[in-house]
Image (tube, rainbow, N blue to C red):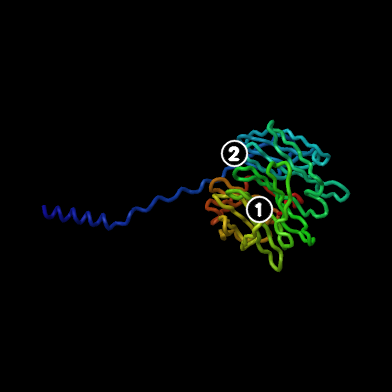
Amino acid sequence: MRRGALALCALALASCSSPPPAPPAPPPPRALTWREVTLPATAATVQDVAYCEDHWLAVGGLPTGPAAWRSTDGTTWTGVRLAPVSFYGRQSTIFTVACRGADAVAVGAASGGAHGNPRTSTWRSRPDGSWLEYEPAFVQFGGQDSVGVGAVAASLEAPAAWAIVGNWLGPDGSPGPALWHSADGATFDRSLVAPGSSARGTDVAPLPGGGWLVSGEAYGTTLTGASWTSKDGTAWTPVPVGGPLALVTPLGGGTLGVGPAGAWWYDGTAWQKRGGFGDANGWRFLTLSAAGDLGVMTAAAGSSCRLWTTRDGGATWEEASMPGPCRSPPRRWRRPR
């Protein structure tokens, strides 16, 4: 009996001193899968895509004028009925789109006039599903003080709000970031974000709780970063950032930004440095999008395109294969990037 008790005690001691089993390895990240889709139009060019809770929107142009398409599954697309009201609206290409549920706002332009400058107008969805063009005064987006008009964004929460980023000449004649903001998506008011600065606006993202973040680059002896936040699109507060920002997007309760110095994370108070992509100098950052914990970024490096993904808020990035052959798109006036 004593010998059995000693043996049992030894087994108990051995089991207590053994290290706990190692936790199971985390599952490998889910690979991206791609499926080519065909739009119901020949010679269509796609300039931007947005996801709107339960459907997709794509915008671009046809040889005959502007175009937009809608899909509930990403595979089968139908054309959106457009109602242009201006001469240039009928010839334009729609280059950016944003949405909140069933509501959509887009921006398009066509070159025209004696100097071939962009003639920019906005488009707003209607209850019947069609989009109506709103033709602004020429000096709203154009004219001698215009530098460029870029991406449109929609607010994350109610009340609905819309914003378009760009660049505009300030009172001293120097270019700087500008924002056009709207409560109804039909009429926009322009505000100068940082007049008299050496900065340029590059992108805009909605902030949790309302308001906007404009990203940018500041030009001096070296290229540095710049950003600004606003609750109402009118009064702006600069937020320092340690590197140039080309693109920004909402992600996980904050804002993810990317640029040649790598990725950055804005938590509502300050920017934090995240991971990088290696040598990104000279890259032209094309797209940045996020869903859940996944962020996807594309960039043009020389004559080729590259695609990177992150699943930890930009701390680490993994390069992925492009789903098909890709050439760097030409530079256009449509985006200040």
Query: Is 310 left or right of 94, judged from the image as shown?
Result: left
Q: Which residue is mark 2?
A: 53
Residue labelled with disc 1 = 299
Please, is residue 184 above or below residue 297 in the view? above
Circle 2: element type: loop
Seen at 85% across and 49% down, the residue is 116
Q: Which comes before the other along the chain, label 2 or label 1?
A: 2
Q: Residues within 10 Å of mark 2 (few under 14, many from 20)?
A: few
- Above or below: residue 315 compared with residue 90: below
**Where in the figure is residue 323, as x and y percent of width and height?**
62, 45
Screen quadrant of the C terminus = bottom right
Classify residue 63 by image quadrant.
Answer: top right
Q: SS class of the residue under badge 1?
A: strand
Of the pair 158 and 215, the residue shown nearer to us: 158
Q: Residue 305: give x, y in percent of width and height.
A: 66, 51
Relative to residue 43, is residue 256 drawn left or right?
A: left
Q: Amino acid at mark 2?
A: Glu
* Nearer-the-camera pick, 331 or 169: 169
**Dot 1 amino acid type:** Ala
Q: Residue at x 83, y 50 (%)?
A: 117
Q: Give the residue furthest to the top.
A: 128
Which x, y percent locates residue 88?
82, 41
- Residue at position x 75%, y 44% in the image: 108
- The one nearer the camera, 274 or 53, is 53
Q: Is residue 112 above or below residue 125?
A: below
Nearer to us: label 2 or label 1: 2
